[in-house]
Image (spheres, rainbow, N blue to C red):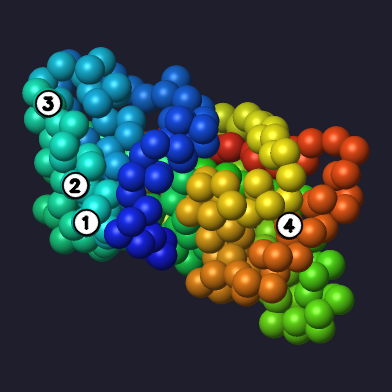
Amino acid sequence: MGDDFGEDDAALFDAFVVPSYLSLFAAAARPLLLVGEAGRVVHLGCRTGYPDAQWLEDMPSTTGVGVDSVQSFLSIASSRLGSMNMRYVLGNPARTGLDPQTFSHALSFHPTRNAKGRIALFAEMGRLLYPGGQALISLPFGDSFQEVLDLLAEYALKHDDAEIEAAFESVPLHRGTPHQLMEELKSAGLSDVGIDIREEQIPFESGRAFVEDPAVRLLILPLVAAWLGRTSLPDEARDYLARAIDKYWSDTAFELKVQIAAVSARR
């Protein structure tokens, strides 16, 4: 998925990121899931396997494959299989090598990608789904994380970081709009696109609490960096975020806005 996770991040992700943050994206997508008595699901960027167990309970006789690029995440996913007919494999979620047109559902939640990577993921979904199959994606878009982007723009100006400053021109493209997502899905051979949008406000007690939060460190800031054309943000920029949040939100909690697009499309 283009994520820079370490092997030691898996337990932290499973214990803190899943319940506090990733669950918002699964909840947004769940009403769009087309449920049948049997099917074959591929979860691209499955990480620790959430929400496979919860969702497959509602889909009798369904089998599945989860793909992720970090083995320690897959080990946790595999450890909770129980009676689920699901297997987890190491690989690139945008280039799985799995047989084409063999899945009824292709799922992805919070892919940490810019526009180019997102298009590659959609193309893989289109390749893997059989005719009539459903792609289901839930991702931040629109005005998500605008507070962080505003502070990073301030950082770039004050620290004469021309690279980050220039990268802001492409942020709208990478965050996406409903029309853009529809066009990207159409190019991947997908149609009948439906998009549900909801907005969440995530509170943080301080700037340091923000930059050290597991969801921020493992998902949000890497995604913002990808929107800026980088693999990561400089340490100086992260420190600036912490100080600026404490300065500008000294009298109230800092609340980060995320717009979640839950997207359904058919092959």
Residue designated by label 2: 75
> Which residue occupies the foreground of this view, 142 or 258?
258
Image location (x, y in percent) of residue 110: 47, 45
- Of labels 4 and 2, earlier in sequence is 2
Q: Please tell me whether mark 3 sits on a helix, a strand or a loop.
A: loop
Residue at the spot 86% in from the left edge and 76% down from the top edge: 158
Residue designated by label 4: 242
Horizontal arrangement in the rendering, residue 217 relative to residue 84 (left or right): right
Marks 1 and 4, how far apart at CA: 32 Å
Marks 3 and 4, how far apart at CA: 42 Å
Horizontal arrangement in the rendering, residue 130 relative to residue 25 (left or right): left
Of the numbered discs in the image, which one, if any, rests on residue 90?
Answer: none
Q: Please tell me whether mark 1 sits on a helix, a strand or a loop.
A: helix
- Which image quadrant for residue 227? bottom right
Task: Point out the frontmost of discs 1 and 4.
Answer: 4
Image location (x, y in percent) of residue 119: 44, 59
Disc 3 residue type (three-letter) = Gly
Up/down of 83 relative to 46, above or below: above
Residue designated by label 1: 71
Residue at the spot 29% in from the left edge and 42% down from the top edge: 48
Marks 2 and 3, how far apart at CA: 13 Å
Question: Which class describes the residues within 10 Å of circle 4: few (<14), some (14-19), or many (20+)?
Answer: some
Residue designated by label 3: 82
